[in-house]
Image (tube, helix red, strand yellow):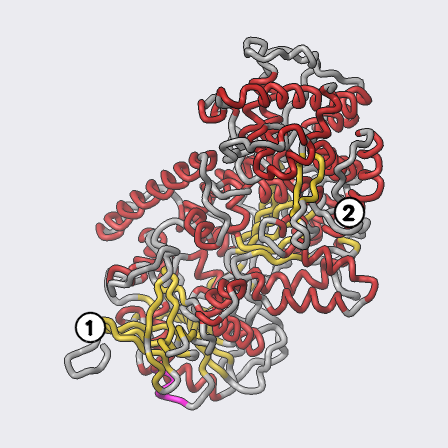
Amino acid sequence: MSAAMALYRYWGKAVRDNDNGSVNCHLLPYHCLDVASVAAYWWDHAPALRKQFCRGYSEQKYRGWLLFFVALHDLGKWDIRFQAKCWSAWTALNPEQAGGKAAGTKWDHGLGGLYWFKKDFDSDDDYDGSLISFNLHPKQQWLFWMEAVAGHHGYIYRHTDTDIAELALPFSQKSPGEKDKQARLAWVDALAALFLHPADLSLNDDPPDCSPLLAGFCSVSDWLGSWSTEDTFCYQSEPAPLDEYFSRRYTVDAPAVLQRSGLLGIVNPWRGLAGLLDKGQQPRQLQTLVDDLPQQPGLTIIEAPTGSGKTETALAYAWRLLASGNADSIIFALPTQATANAMLNRLEKLAVRLFKHPNLILAHGHSRLSSDFAAIKSRAKNVQDEEAWVQCCEWLSRSNKRAFLGQIGVCTIDQVLISVLPVKHRFIRGFGIGRSILLVDEVHAYDTYMHNLLAEVLRQQYLVGQSALLLSATLPVGLKQRLLATYGNKNTVPPSVEYPLVTWQQQEQWRCFDLNATPQHLPTPFNLNIDRRYLPDMQPDDELLQEMIAAAQSGAQVCFICNLVDVAQQVYQQLCASTELEIILFHSRFTLIDREKKERRTLDYFGASGDRSCGRILVATQVVEQSLDVDFDWLMTQHCPADLLFQRAGRLHRHFRPSRPQGCQQPVLTVILPPTDDYGNSNYIYTNTRAMWRTQQLLERLDQSPLVFPQAYRDWIDDVYQDDSEDEEPTWVAEGMERFANQELAKRYNARLVLNQAAQVIPFADDDSHIRAVTRDGEMSLPLIPYVATTSGRQLLNGQIFDSLPEFSMPEELALNRVNVPGSWQRKFRLEPDQDGVVWLAGTIQQNQWIAEITDCRLVYSEEVGMTAGNINPQGGVS
């Protein structure tokens, strides 16, 4: 038998017929060509992606190399150890071997493919490589390409890791191993004829540099090339000419699966920023700069105050870059799930202005439970012409990995950071991000650990020639310079005092854009009156509580923002005991079911079009600080660093209203400060003591003068975060800063450590708990499942009997009923997590509350207050 005919005696996919027990198989060369056909069609219809891959190299030649290597992705299946995994399929193709069965079927065909790629082409090896013209030691450049395609099942192996004894064939399988090698060599020759020769290439040529996007591109092509249905990629077990088979799959099957997947979007022509605005609206402030920004990839930092149109500016610039052929899609990353949910609603009506039939996908740990996202998909089902859109959306949303493959992905920052961390299939996200313009909102909201991870994400965007846009009210100079340096600039960009400001960076090129040339578009100065209150533990006293109640009784929408959940719960209970007014408590220590209700209620009452028919009070934590479009007549806050103080202040008189309740006509921010030299428990939340102290000094220097925006953004942030200490700085501040500096060093070290581990052999599974573990530093929250023990099994807070649920619905019910509590509770209350790191805690239902007593502690959960903890005193009460 010729080596070429031997190709048709290997199976690539196999499925057993449950009715008669027979096995239907798909020949290995045909599966490889299925995947190559998807890659070819995708390549031919994605000009922006071609530009990123080629980087000046001939598109025709790059296509030849790309398809050649993509078709080699399953090289490790040309091995008896893989073929033995379905012995009936193997013997059907090789009836002469029906009498026995090969031993040892444990075989990683990804790693094995890379191993054989090295061994087969090694002229010093004891196999004969005469069938292939490339009979040399494989060159480094070839190995990089092979590494990328061989990692399609979740981990990119390095060729330096493949010379291990366990990959070698045992002596007993030397004979079939020789046949496997001849088939592999014949396959390489066949692929050279199919893909290299038409591009005027041969096996003696060197491929170009391997793109960091290749691993993700190959993996997604493999997913789609394995999409076997009644009309796509049907199994074929009879030999047919390879070129005819590839042509048929390219013409018929590949377009069908790519359409169903939603990967090939159509960008609407650029119509200027006006194309994003509602009829009659005119560009304002930063939005007028969009046409001046460079029409080439780079890093763009947009610094502007709340309400200045940063989001529309960023989207309009992204649209312009998309329309000019620099990217295929947009990814919008936000700090929290709540802010991602809010952005999803905001982008829904804008998406169709950027793309024709766009796939708008939400990606975070609980995205599948989002009612708004479900509604977006459901609405499309009612339109006959949109059935394909729905199918795309369904496929893309089945996994957070796929969410970055649509036209617009809205996600939490964690989902973006995974692309550089030791998580399985991280390169899928890396590919999705790399083909997209990355927008990151509220950049100031992350800590040093996350900023270091974000810097690596940006560096990868730079390496693949793609754009990133960072949005913030303003950034400390040091952080801004570190982020700008990720785009190849070894020199410091001169700081600008202008504000608002757009800074663009690409290698040694940089430009700053401000509104000096059009002063009429500068933000209108905004005077904010500061009301300083010095109160023990920075908590409201009875007098302030009564003022809040009186304001709400006069019709005002009042908000008090606390630094800690415990404080928010206490203030809420004090207010409820003093008034019949509607009081809403919003923080993170609720079940997902109750938290979504709180978020919706908060937006319904305090949103841009909220019900302001009567006064109300919202007591909240930082959950309302980022990106939620809420508007209060009077806002109070515990003291915090200046940048976060400004974020909170951005929720005060956020929207123009013709009238405000009596006493609230002018915006007043009440800041509660400590009467002593200590920030109490807030020190655990805001560890930068110097930033806290300097912010307090600036507040006090105002005396009776108002805080003037937008000037305060630049002046205050620069003052608060400058590196030098001050002569008048108290000893307790210096001591706090020493602790803070050590913590910052630890965070940088941890970031470097986890980034270095990104190439470890066994990455973490791609699930929500592992993702948080590697994207967030410091003490993690502890997932707790409150339940009631019944004769039928464990009853969750929403009434479901967990043990009676179908297995497929269990993860969703756990997500809905889980409460994230401080990690310190595990030690403090001696809580025991299970093997998945989740604490199951039995309790009882009393007066609509779940209650559990553990030694001298009582945990209580209610829909109104969330989870609380207290010590049981000797009289039986809780303190």
- Quarter assignment of residue 124: top right
Nearest-to-viewer mark from 1 and 2 = 2
- Along the line of sight, which residue is nearer the eye, 452 or 182? 182
- Quarter assignment of residue 358: bottom right
Is residue 718 a member of the stretch shown in magenta? no
- For the C terminus, give its image quadrant: bottom left
Residue position for label 1: 856
At label 1, counting other C-alpha atoms closer than 10 Å, the crowd grade (few under 14, some 14-19, many 20 or more) is few
Residue position for label 2: 232
- Along the line of sight, which residue is nearer the eye, 508 or 73? 73
- For the N terminus, give its image quadrant: top right
Residue at 55% across / 12% down in the picture?
A: 125
Q: Is residue 410 above or below residue 133?
A: below
Residue at 67% across / 16% down in the picture?
A: 206
At label 2, counting other C-alpha atoms closer than 10 Å, the crowd grade (few under 14, some 14-19, many 20 or more) is some
Q: Which percent across, then down, holds residue 482?
A: 48, 38
The amino acid sitting under disc 1 is Asp
User: How far is disc 1 from disc 2 in space, using C-alphas?
Assistant: 63 Å
Is residue 578 a member of the stretch shown in magenta? yes
Q: Which percent across, then down, holds residue 141?
A: 61, 20
Residue at 44% across / 59% down in the picture?
A: 644
The amino acid sitting under disc 2 is Thr
Q: Which percent across, then down, holds residue 607?
A: 58, 73
| Helix, strand or loop for the magenta stretch, by majority | helix
Residue at 80% across / 34% down in the picture?
A: 246
Q: Is residue 706 above or below residue 254?
A: below
Q: Range of the magenta residues?
A: 574-579
